[in-house]
Amino acid sequence: MTASKPNYVSYNEIRAGVIARLDRVSDIAEDGEDEAVICVAREEVPALLAGTRALISLHRPDDQGRCRACRGGRWWRRRPVPCRPLLEFQLAVHTASTGRGRHHRR
Ligand SMILES: [Zn+2]
């Protein structure tokens, strides 16, 4: 069995596109005119939440309580749930919702 090769060009394009979209939505939500904020809330937020749900749904436990997405090699090395990406997501949401970390972007 051969592993597929990483495509860093696609990865970089996807990542940059998602980050640009998130930055645009964040800028409008934080500093935009009310009409623009309403448009973002109705059009962009549902799409971003759908993407978030899709990513989170990947990080669910298998029969042994280990994350299906965070397979770090052999079965005994798989991460137990909750895995680090899920915890990082929760921390980021908490930090943003409490006002700490505002304008902090990677
Ligand atoms: Zn995971």
Image (cartoon, rainbow, N blue to C red):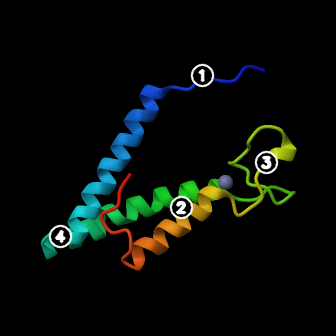
Distance from disc 3 to disc 2, alpha carbons, whole Å, reads: 22 Å
Q: Which residue is mark 4?
A: 31
Question: Within 10 Å of the Cα at label 1, are there few (<14), some (14-19), or many (20+) other Cα atoms?
Answer: few
Distance from disc 3 to disc 4, alpha carbons, whole Å, reads: 42 Å
Distance from disc 1 to disc 3, alpha carbons, whole Å, reads: 21 Å
The location of residue 25, given as percent across then percent down, is 28, 61
First in sequence: mark 4 vs mark 1: 1
Residue drawn where x is 45% and y is 72% of the image: 95
Distance from disc 2 to disc 1, alpha carbons, whole Å, reads: 27 Å
First in sequence: mark 3 vs mark 4: 4
The location of residue 39, given as percent across then percent down, is 22, 67
Which mark is in front, 2 or 1? 1
First in sequence: mark 3 vs mark 2: 2
Secondary structure at numbered mark 1 = loop
Q: Which residue is mark 3?
A: 78
Residue drawn where x is 41% and y is 34% of the image: 12
Secondary structure at numbered mark 2 = helix
Q: Which residue is mark 1?
A: 5
Amino acid carrying label 4: it is Asp
Amino acid carrying label 3: it is Arg
Q: Which residue is mark 2?
A: 53
Amino acid carrying label 1: it is Lys
